[in-house]
Image (cartoon, rainbow, N blue to C red):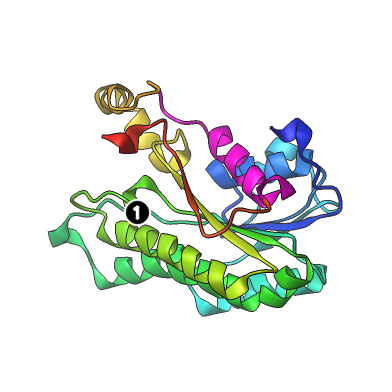
């Protein structure tokens, strides 16, 4: 897909870009010619190692998106970089699989603020830059935002609400800005390392996935780049499942 999409001269903010899905999204967009503003919590991490780039078409901003100050820092950095924003990928997220009796107020706030509040307020704070660029927002949710399971309550709640917020924002920001969502299934990232390193659990997921495998970060980045591009110019308010068919069960 990437060979047919050109993002030359387009400015795109990718949150949570130091590893996993965010890193792959940033790398793919760079390969398509985009000017990428890569956010991470503490620094560029593996993204710099993977691309060998700093400056020019790749800029970094570090901030804790669970805090108001962190969200405002990222928005201010973007405003200082460009007058038009063509893409916003809200990928940064936190997962903890705590059971009901283990959940805490602090963990709830940390998870929901990062996974839900930050994407909403980045869209709010950057809306004029996005309108100026006729931009596209892609929020990264999860299949856990569509189907319930025991545990990980703030994660499930935040990812489910993000899908609804996507639909609401698509109405608010139309017709200048499109807003869509990607809901990954089980992807082989650092966040899921414990799962896919467990041979028994890994096999269980594969057997319950019609396409018979775990997803790779590039499976998600391909969907994201499509939604950011003009090829998706008549798509807004939608959530695309990229889960190998697992949600069919």
* One can see residue 48 in this view: no
What residue lies at 18% left-to-right and 54% top-to-bottom? 99
The region drawn magenta spans 213-232
Left or right of residue 122, residue 60 in this image? right
Q: Quadrant of residue 196?
A: top left
Q: Position of residue 30 (x, y in %)?
A: 76, 43
Placement of the N terminus among the 4 image quadrants: top right
Main secondary structure of the magenta stretch: helix
Question: How packed is label 1: few (under 14 Cα within 10 Å), some, or many (20 or more)?
Answer: many
What residue lies at 31% left-to-right and 68% top-to-bottom? 108
What residue lies at 40% left-to-right and 49% top-to-bottom? 142
In this view of the protein, which residue sits in the foreground, 242 or 107? 242
What residue lies at 31% left-to-right and 66% top-to-bottom? 107
**Above or below: residue 9 compared with residue 77:** above
Q: Position of residue 61 (x, y in %)?
A: 68, 62
Q: Quadrant of residue 42?
A: bottom right
In this view, the residue farthest toward the front is 234
Placement of the C terminus among the 4 image quadrants: top left
Secondary structure at badge 1 equals: helix
Q: Quadrant of residue 220?
A: top right
Residue marked by disc 1: 145
In this view, the residue farthest toward the left is 101
Magenta-colored stretch includes residue 205? no
In this view of the protein, which residue sits in the foreground, 215 or 108? 215
**Above or below: residue 243 compared with residue 213:** below
């Amino acid at each position: 897909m990437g060979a047919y999409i050109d993002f030359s001269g387009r400015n795109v903010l990718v949150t949570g870009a130091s590893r996993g899905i965010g890193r792959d999204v940033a790398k793919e967009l760079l390969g398509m010619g985009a000017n990428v503003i890569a956010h991470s919590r503490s620094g560029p991490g593996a993204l710099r190692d993977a691309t060998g780039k700093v400056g020019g078409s790749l800029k970094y901003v570090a901030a804790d998106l669970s805090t108001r100050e962190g969200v405002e820092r990222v928005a201010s950095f973007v405003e200082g970089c460009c007058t038009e924003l063509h893409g916003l990928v809200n990928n940064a997220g936190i997962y903890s699989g705590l059971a009901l009796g283990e959940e805490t107020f602090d963990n709830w706030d940390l998870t929901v603020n990062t996974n839900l509040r930050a994407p909403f307020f980045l869209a709010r704070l950057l809306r004029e830059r996005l309108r100026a660029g006729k931009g596209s927002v892609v929020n990264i949710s999860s299949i856990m935002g569509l189907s319930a399971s025991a545990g990980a309550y703030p994660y499930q709640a935040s990812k489910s609400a993000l899908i609804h917020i996507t639909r609401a924002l698509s109405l608010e920001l139309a017709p200048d800005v499109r807003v869509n969502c990607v809901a990954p299934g089980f992807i082989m990232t650092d966040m899921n390392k414990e799962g896919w390193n467990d041979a028994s659990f890994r096999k269980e997921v594969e057997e319950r996935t019609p396409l018979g495998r775990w997803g790779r970060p590039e499976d998600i980045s391909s969907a994201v780049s499509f939604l950011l591009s003009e090829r998706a110019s008549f798509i807004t308010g939608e959530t695309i499942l990229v889960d190998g068919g697992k949600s069919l069960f």
